[in-house]
Image: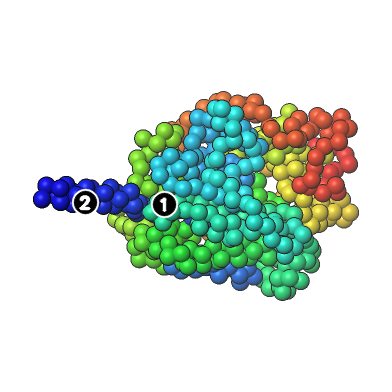
Amino acid sequence: MKLIAISIFFVLTLVSCSEKKVEVDKRPNILFCIADDASFPHMGAYGTNWIKTPAFDKVAKEGLLFMNAYTPNAKCAPSRSAILTGRNSWQLEEAANHWNNFPLKFKSYVEVLGENGYTTGFTGKGWGPGRAISWDGTPRELTGKAYKDIKMDPPTTKISGNDYSANFKVFLDSTSTNTPWCFWYGGYEPHRAYEYGTGIGKGKKELSDIKEVPAFWPDNETVRTDMLDYAYEVEYFDFHLEKIIAALEASGQLENTIIVVTADNGMPFPRIKGQEYELSNHLPLAIMWPKGIKNPGRIVQEYVSFIDFAPTFVEIAGLEWEKTQMAPTPGKSLTDIFNDSQNEIEDRDFVVFGKERHDVGRPNDQGYPIRGIVKNDYLYVKNFEPTRWPAGNPETGYLNTDGSPTKTVILDLRRNEGNTEYWQMNFGKRPGEELYQIKADPLCMENLADVDEMKSIKAELSTLLVTTLEAQQDPRILGNGEIFECYPYIGKESNFYERFMNGEEMNTGWVNDTDFEKEKMD
């Protein structure tokens, strides 16, 4: 009898141990999907009918559609740095700039989740451009392990050959259903360059599909064709998003996966990407989480910032921010919005933004420092160095504006026809302060900064901006802004202005040869 009892006890112990080994971690999966250069409101859910995005629209319909989501910095690397760390770019030292050395002291939410039981991975464009190196000299996995081996024949010569959805499926098949995962889908689209005319040819679009061309560009066939090529690449990003969601549904994991869909900065056109206007920083955002969002189908009007993503993911992963070794964040978790706790939502009535150095092209690799704020449908901008060229020096090709047919049209109008109106709006120097009423003027065309009736609003916004940035220890506000220009630019184009002006051949692959002015301009 003793032998039987011992045997039963031994069997029960093995069963108990076995059960512990297969214990399911029920924390949610996290799928972060980010397009490369797409502005609000260029998704179907916002009513833009010349761009079809059924996958984004599904996420919005079955989750939440955000009407006021902003990046703190409208350029790839600093925007993605803010997403990953929960800190504004001016709080990230070198990572405030484009093409930077990502500081060791700042951890990404992906790294933290990986240290706490999550399987992590990404495909496409993760963080960058720049360099992120560990203490031992090995590359950091700021967005997880790369999944990029599966290729496909892209529909145009300029679209990436990465089969994003197939690579996600490889990741998904490699994960255990007993543990949560965190995946970053970073499409390279709709980043330039485009194959001209593909929006009309392969996208089966017509020039008349665009009801209105932004007033700071000429309304002609070339510009409309360029816009439709952009639309085609936004739709390509959405095509893979649709396949990724389908793979999730097929795996039975959709219910407990939070899906976030957005873009890093505005569309790669003059006066938008790399600048700090409404179409630069105001971005599409839809979030779906069947198991975690109450009353889905809502439209969210509160202002949210990209620094809110990291604290959201850390919280839903069941972690305490203070114990993750991540630097303090001014971001606020979005779970209050997920819970639809209208009476408990923290103040979300403004967002701040700004920039330092993006692409080079000014003497001594100088940047164009800006800080700004959006509140109560007003956008206020402080330009700290208004004597500098906002898009880069003309003689070096306005390097902070990607080369494009639209850019060429605007430059040719000034050179060939003496039409300086569009050139001034897109490339000309700017005043020290700008103020726009964005509900009536979303294109930021009428500067109200010097209007007497607006002085009190300008003063209120300026005071709130400075107070907020002082609390965040922004070096620019505290009188040490030059530190951002001391950080090295690690791209091949370092010291571009001096080398270019001395006749050295430089890498200018992201702009056109005709972008360069033949004579220096005042």
* Residue 99 in sight from this viewpoint: yes
Residue at 58% in and 47% down: 146
Residue at 84% in and 44% down: 516
Residue at 38% in and 54% down: 178
Q: Which residue is mark 1?
A: 180
Left or right of 200? Residue 89 is left
Left or right of 229? Residue 348 is left
Left or right of 59? Residue 8 is left
Note whether 198 is above or below 355 in the view shown. below
Amino acid tagged 1: Pro
Occupied quadrant, residue 254: bottom left
Q: Measuring from the top left, give residue 85's x and y in whole percent.
A: 49, 40
Local crowd at mark 1 within 10 Å, few (<14), some, or many (≥20)? Answer: many
* Residue 103 in sight from this viewpoint: no
Which residue of the protein is positioned furthest toward the left in this rendering?
1
Local crowd at mark 2 within 10 Å, few (<14), some, or many (≥20)? Answer: few
Residue at 47% in and 53% down: 175
Amino acid tagged 2: Leu
In this rendering, which labeled residue sits more in front, label 2 or label 1? 2
Mark 2: secondary structure: helix
In contact (CB < 8 Å): disc 2 and disc 1: no
Q: CA distance from mark 2 to mark 1?
A: 28 Å
Foreground of the two, 159 or 413: 159
Q: Measuring from the top left, give residue 454's x and y in whole percent.
A: 53, 48
Residue 12 is marked as 2
- Give the image's coloring scheme: rainbow
Occupied quadrant, residue 430: top right
Note whether 492 is above or below 307 in the view shown. above
Q: Quadrant of the C terminus?
A: top right
Q: Measuring from the top left, give residue 132's x and y in whole percent.
A: 59, 35
Q: Measuring from the top left, give residue 320's x and y in whole percent.
A: 35, 40
Residue 197 is marked as none
